[in-house]
Amino acid sequence: MASVIGWLDHSEEQQRKMREVIDLFSETDSRDELGIGAVRDAFSDLLFPGLSTIQTRARYFFFVPWVYLDLERRRVPAGQIAQKARQRQLELIYALEAGGESGGVIGIDARERLKRLPESVYWNGLGVFDLRRYQGGLGDYRRSIGRFYRQVDAFAGYEAEQIDIERPTNWHPALPPRPDGLFEETTLALTGEEAHFLRERIVTADPGSLLAHYLLAGQPVEGTIALPWDGVDFDGLPDELARRVRYGRWFSELFWGAALLYNLLLAEEATRRELQSGGAERVDHYRDRLDDWVGLVAARRSEFEAVQRDDFWRVVSHTGARVTDKTRRFLDQWFDLALAPGGSVATNRSAHRLIGDREQGLKRGLARLGNPRQLEIWGGLSGAGQLNYRWGTGRVIVNDIIDGLTDA
């Protein structure tokens, strides 16, 4: 029977996490094969809150509210609002195309077959940055729209009687206005007003994030900056942000070795069992990358060893991340092996056993190591990329906003 994930009445946060899990399974090089997603997500939220790996451009943070504000203005009922919103978001594809856009346009290839609409991609971020005032999931918002209309009508009565109450709204009241002709022709470029507003919202939401730091620096981020800390002067960071970034970098760099070793072990076993062609080249590739990683650890050993591990875990736990005891033990054991003097994890039997036991504990019958059936269908690359905590999205969002400010 095919596996089906039903979107029941889970919380907004649960739905967001589930969507991110699904998204990561479609990104082979960043897939979480060893069950460390809770730690990865903790640092992603600390450094780049409100973003996700499938967001494309900053102006969608306005497109989604503009769509729903228009539907609210027209009093579209709850039973029709999802379909009307979908139609508007499909119209945006053609409007952006008419404006000369292609890259970054959600649905440019799928068009009418689009399943993941911008509204679901940006819903969490809209709440994090306070562009969305409705506190709840997208489905709850739609179902509650009739009650909202009644609240607006009641407010009109109070206003007529000069009773001082706050006007009900699902969106930030100072949101820049929707441009005329938006659904006929538009672009992904932010206006100066939009860029100023979005920067203010992001910085206000979490001034201690790396995302806010890049925005306040006011400089575009070069595409050659591959990792978020590569463009950072640590001495110029506030103490708490420097702590977040250092721990995030430490975890990213140390855990990278575990991801590479896992792929090396898969390549070696697949080659030994003659399950795939090109096995020897793949083994050499992962050995070379693991050797490079060993060199990285050796070069930065003093920094790595200076990290207070209890404080590292304290930072992770303060985000609300649910890291199981098994995951913490696995990672602490890996850190010990990675920082042990002499030798290489590539030939360390304890390291091999740790990785194998971890995969078996997580996947059971679907584990690849020691399982020829699963190993035979391995694609040759499973989560071997270094963790960058949504940096690809962060760099684009920062540059969109900086460009808008510059062009204002």
Image (tube, helix red, strand yellow):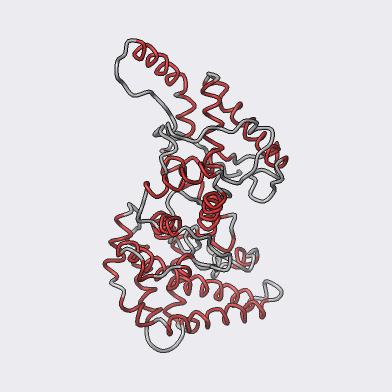
> In the rendering, at what x and y percent does residue 132 appear?
44, 36
Count numbered badges in the picture.
0
Q: Residue at x 44, y 58 (%)?
A: 37
* Residue 248 location, quadrant: bottom left
Q: In front here: 109 or 153?
A: 153
Which is more toward the observer, 174 or 53?
A: 174
Q: Is residue 107 above or below residue 216?
A: above
**In the rendered image, which quarter contains the N terminus?**
top right
Image quarter for residue 164? top left
What x and y, as percent, mark residue 270? 62, 73
Q: Position of residue 42 (x, y in %)?
A: 39, 56
Residue pictured at 60% horizontal, 74% vertical: 267
Q: Position of residue 25 (x, y in %)?
A: 56, 55
Name the residue at 41% across, 89% down.
Answer: 342
Residue under the point 47% across and 58% down = 218
Is 182 displayed left or right of 204 in the figure?
A: right
